[in-house]
Amino acid sequence: MSEKKKSKKKEDTKEITILLKKVQADFENYQKRTEKEKQQFVEYACSDMIKDLLPILDSFELALKNTQNKDIEVLYNQLKQLLESKGLEKIKALDKKFDPFLHEALIQEASDKESGIVLEELQTGYKFKDNIIRPAKVKVSK
């Protein structure tokens, strides 16, 4: 084989190797991207289901305030633990500074506390995996 042909083969081999490495990198990026999108879809579906369960959780909390029924308390705790294990988290509001990203002010009331402090939590707010799915409805000092 002539020197030109050997040199041409080496160049072709290098080009093909570079091209294959690019294709492999693109494929790996594609796999990572589709896996991330799949995970986001699952989280979105879970978030949607958890939103639908929040009124049930609220009803349990209301029932617990009005009764001392241990069966209701057990069921409430089971549901709450299940949702928390999936990523649900209560938004702490009482005695905190009002945050419009976390709280929805329904009432303002004169108080001896500093202005903008949450005086009462009217409805519990929740986060799901760091996303607000329901802001806390609150009474704020003015």
Image: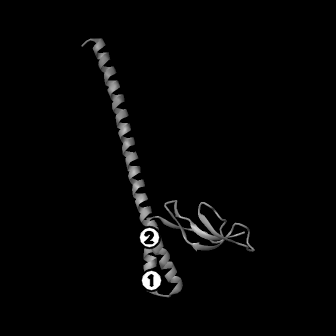
Residue type (three-letter) at the residue carrying disc 2: Leu
Q: Which residue is at the front of the view, 49 or 69?
A: 49
Q: Is residue 85 visible in the rendered structure shown here? A: no
Q: Which residue is at the front of the view, 27 or 116?
A: 116
Q: Tell me the residue that label 2 is attached to.
A: 53
Establish if 130 lies above or below 2.
Answer: below
Q: Which residue is at the front of the view, 71 or 17?
A: 71
Residue type (three-letter) at the residue carrying disc 1: Ile
**Which residue: 32% across, 27% down?**
16
In the figure, is residue 90 to the left or right of 81? right
Q: Quadrant of the N terminus?
A: top left
Q: Tell me the residue that label 1 is attached to.
A: 72
Q: Is residue 120 visible in the rendered structure shown here? A: yes
Q: Secondary structure at mark 2?
A: helix
Q: Earlier in the sequence, mark 1 or mark 2?
A: 2
Q: Which residue is at the front of the view, 31 or 60?
A: 60
**Which residue: 60% across, 65% down?**
103
Q: Mark 1 or mark 2, which is nearer to you?
A: 2
Mark 1 closeness class: few <14, some 14–19, many ≥20 residues within 10 Å: some
Image position, residue 87 (x, y; %) = 46, 64
